[in-house]
Amino acid sequence: MVADQLHSASIHLLRKLRREDAASGLNAARLSALSVIVFAGPITPGDLAAAEQVRPPTMTRIVDALVQHGLAEKKENAQDGRSTLIQATGLGKKLLLRGRDRRVRVLAERVGGLDSDDRDVLKRAAEILKRVIVAI
Amino acid sequence: MVADQLHSASIHLLRKLRREDAASGLNAARLSALSVIVFAGPITPGDLAAAEQVRPPTMTRIVDALVQHGLAEKKENAQDGRSTLIQATGLGKKLLLRGRDRRVRVLAERVGGLDSDDRDVLKRAAEILKRVIVAI
DNA sequence: ACGTGATAGTTAGCTAAGCTAACGATATAT
DNA sequence: ATATATCGTTAGCTTAGCTAACTATCACGT
């Protein structure tokens, strides 16, 4: 029952936020990957795919899109010629650290409008969920 | 911050659950639509699209897939010849009401393994989230 | 030093979700 | 009766996901 609700909420949340994407060129997959690149980068495509729970070919295309939008760039991996390292550009960092993406901003505004009890429940839930998801 | 975490959790949750789909032929969009059909049906494609926050052409294809898998069926709308009504088949109902889909079951198992405090937080969060999402 | 096997990333090719634009069919209002 | 609005579908696009197959590099055993 709770599982149903969480599942449903996730689907509908992402669908709602999706509407903000057209303007920015940054959708769920790209924003999520960029976040990892900014906070954990430079990082190899393989590690990025693992962090994002996605197969390597999927990540290849997400990274390509980020590079094309000037949000990330590739550099050689001195330790391993097969591999590359992905790092955020200034623009990519700025977008994530300062301005924050439209997508998440819309949600943040709504969460900010809640009373502090509710906000606290969401905060605790986010952490519990994180653990639950890792275990799946 | 909380918004970021919720956004990220939603993405990663759905990606994890996606793995269960190949076997069943029921993915996120279809399962979510079927749920509405079972609990709110018979329903027109238009209303279904609205309930699912999706454009009509998107729903056309989701419904087609459900019909093809024998989980839903169309019948004439006596009130309006332009429209049709979608209703769940016995199989569709059974899948949702009894057995429950693999997708959600995997999550339910994990949630069930939490202590009751954590489960309660998730339950409350699901309800708060539901309200937040409607308001977006 | 060199061939064999493992590993990293990409390419190719598929399914499916999402969208807009355009269209046929039916309802409704004038 | 005719114009307008609405419902659903079709067509055509982008993007996310996958597996399988390929290339390039690395690491190891002889």
Image (cartoon, coloured by chain):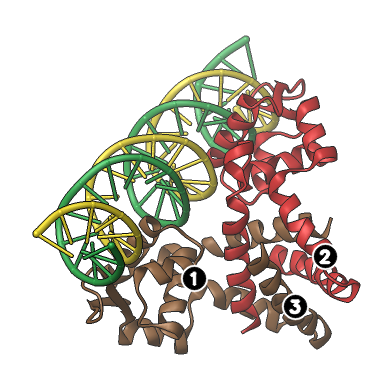
Chain colours: A red, B brown, C green, D yellow
Disc 1 marks a residue whose amino acid type is Ala
Q: Which residue is mark 1?
A: B51
How far apart are the two marked residues, 3 and 2, measured between alpha carbons? 20 Å
User: Residues under labels 3 and 1: Cα distance?
Assistant: 23 Å
Q: Residue furthest right?
A: A116
Q: Earlier in the sequence, mark 3 or mark 1?
A: 1
Quadrant containing the N terminus of chain A in the rendered view: bottom right
Q: Nearer the viewer, residue B38 or A4?
A: B38
Q: Which residue is mark 2?
A: A113
Please name whichever residue, B33 or A102, is drawn nearer the observer in this view of the structure. A102
Q: Which residue is mark 3?
A: B122
Query: What chain does mark 1 sit on?
Result: B
Task: Find residue B59 and report its horizontal and vertical position in percent.
Answer: 38, 62
Where is residue A82? Give x, y as percent.
64, 25
Element at label 1: helix
Residue B89 in the image, given as x and y percentages of width and height: 30, 83
Asked if marks 2 and 1 touch (Cβ < 8 Å), the reply is no
Q: Amino acid at mark 3?
A: Leu
In this rendering, position of residue B78 left or right of residue A108: left
Packing grade of label 3 (10 A; few <14, some 14-19, many >=20) is many
| Residue type beneath disc 2 | Gly
Residue at (84%, 62%) from the top-left corner?
A112
Chain of the residue that carries numbered disc 2 in the rendered image: A
At x 71%, y 57%, the residue is B7
Which residue does the image show at 64% across and 27% down from the upper left?
A: A69
